[in-house]
Image: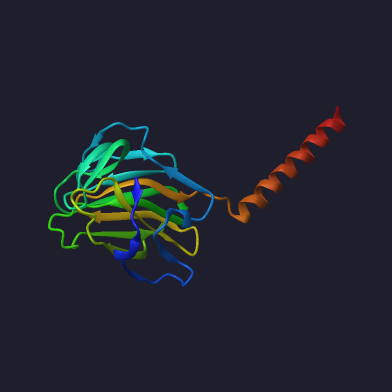
Amino acid sequence: MNKFNLIAGLVLAISSAASHAAVIVDRADVPVSQTVIDFESEDGLNLLGGDTYNFAGGSITATDSYTVGQYIADLGENGLWGAGNHFVSFDTIGQMTMNISFAAPTKGVAFDYSIYEENADGSAMLTARYYDANDSLLKTAKFIFSPFGANSYDQFQSFGYVSDAANIARVSISGDGVVLDNLTFTAAVPEPESYAMLLAGLGLMGVVARRRSQRV
């Protein structure tokens, strides 16, 4: 898909997070190591509101019907998406919400997206809300952009958020006719305490092994 220059984009962000946290408009800004879910393994999997789709590292649910592995979408004044590329689509006309939950809290998450635009007036909006493991709101970000044009093809923008810690457990995406692809998030990295416990365990195993060898 072709990435659109974000000249016409306007990010409206409301947050109580620390100054290190930031809304991003490039998936490359998600901290390494990155995991990317491109949905190419699915081919038109239709799911109802409340159904769960599991992927490596998390799951997706939605308030209304959605498709994983969608291959064509008419986005009105934002043109067409599809043909040779699979993605996720909101399938209900009107506002709906999709929740993406992560198996382990992540520091950053982003995705490529577009949205249905009916009147070419730039009123279409995507809202993303980011929550921690206690379901406390970390960030609300809204993105508005000028339409790509009805004759455009596979145009998209990237959008996401990097927190000041690995504390993003869920992102809630709301909009009308949203399509998204290349879900990118920071892979879980063990905390220093986990490394210390692992090393201590390995050391204990070494002591036990030496004692056993001395008894033989």
Q: Is residue 130 above or below residue 43?
A: below
* Residue drawn at x 77%, y 37% as measured from the top left: 208
Q: Is residue 70 above or below residue 110?
A: above
Check the image and name the residue furthest to the front. Answer: 151
Q: Position of residue 120 (x, y in %)?
A: 16, 59
Please tell me how many numbered marks the rendered image carries.
0
21 or 146: which is nearer to us? 146
Residue 67, quarter of picture: top left
The answer to whether residue 60 is seen in the rendering is yes
* Residue drawn at x 20%, y 53% as measured from the top left: 149
Type of colouring: rainbow
8 or 163: which is nearer to us? 8
The answer to whether residue 9 is seen in the rendering is no
Check the image and name the residue furthest to the top. Answer: 216
Q: Is residue 193 above or below residue 1?
A: below
Q: Position of residue 20 (x, y in %)?
A: 49, 69
165 or 22: which is nearer to us? 22
Q: Position of residue 2 (x, y in %)?
A: 34, 48
Q: Position of residue 157 (x, y in %)?
A: 33, 55
The C terminus sits in image quarter: top right
15 relative to 216 in the view: left or right: left
The N terminus sits in image quarter: top left
* Residue drawn at x 16%, y 62% as measured from the top left: 121
73 relative to 52 in the view: left or right: left
